[in-house]
């Protein structure tokens, strides 16, 4: 191994585990955003987390971390949950609603010293 030619060695760009994980999660799930940035992500995949405020058929009204409300359109008309929070992978529509693109994952929460653990 000590006699290896310099020509045979490849220099790959440096990459950190943090960058790799961040890039991979954005490709797999979509970029995590708040409602404040919905207009910047029209027709793009995103991941949105919020508090469930109201459910009517396949429309869930979700309160974002900024305290504003967003309508999320689900594939399933019979959505039912005991969970207080939800994470949705979807595409942002022109009217700034989130259209679900895959099965909704519920986020179950636990309160520990008034902190929400997701």
Image (cartoon, helix red, strand yellow):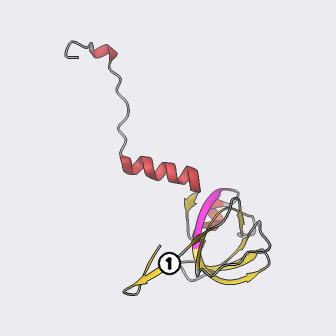
Q: Which residues are magenta?
A: 44-49
Q: Residue at x 47, y 72 (%)?
A: 118
Q: Nearer the viewer, residue 88 or 98?
A: 88
Outermost residue toward the left?
Answer: 2
User: Where 1 sits versus 38, above or below?
Assistant: above
The answer to whether 105 appears left or right of 56 in the picture is: left
Outermost residue toward the bottom?
Answer: 114
Q: Residue 110 magenta-drawn?
A: no
Q: Residues within 10 Å of mark 1 (few under 14, many from 20)?
A: some
User: Where 99 sits versus 113, above or below?
Assistant: above
Q: Residue at x 72, y 70 (%)?
A: 97
The answer to whether 24 appears left or right of 77 in the picture is: left
Label 1: which secondary element: loop
Q: Residue at x 27, y 16 (%)?
A: 6
Say which residue label 1 marks. 109
Q: Position of residue 76 (x, y in %)?
A: 77, 69
Q: Residue at x 70, y 57 (%)?
A: 43
Q: Position of residue 63 (x, y in %)?
A: 61, 81
Q: Position of residue 57 (x, y in %)?
A: 80, 78
Q: Residue 48 magenta-drawn?
A: yes
Determine which quarter of the picture holds residue 111: bottom left
Q: Position of residue 99 (x, y in %)?
A: 73, 65
């Amino acid at each position: 191994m000590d006699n290896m030619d310099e020509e045979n060695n490849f220099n790959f760009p440096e990459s950190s585990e943090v960058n790799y994980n961040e890039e991979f999660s954005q490709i797999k799930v979509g970029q995590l955003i708040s409602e404040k940035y919905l207009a910047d992500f029209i027709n793009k995949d995103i991941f949105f987390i919020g508090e469930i405020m109201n459910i009517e058929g396949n429309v869930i009204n979700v309160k974002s971390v900024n305290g504003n409300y967003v309508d999320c359109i689900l594939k399933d008309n019979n959505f039912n949950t005991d969970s207080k929070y939800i994470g949705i992978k979807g595409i942002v529509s022109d009217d700034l609603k989130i259209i679900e693109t895959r099965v909704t994952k519920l986020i179950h929460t636990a309160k520990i010293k008034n902190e929400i653990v997701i």
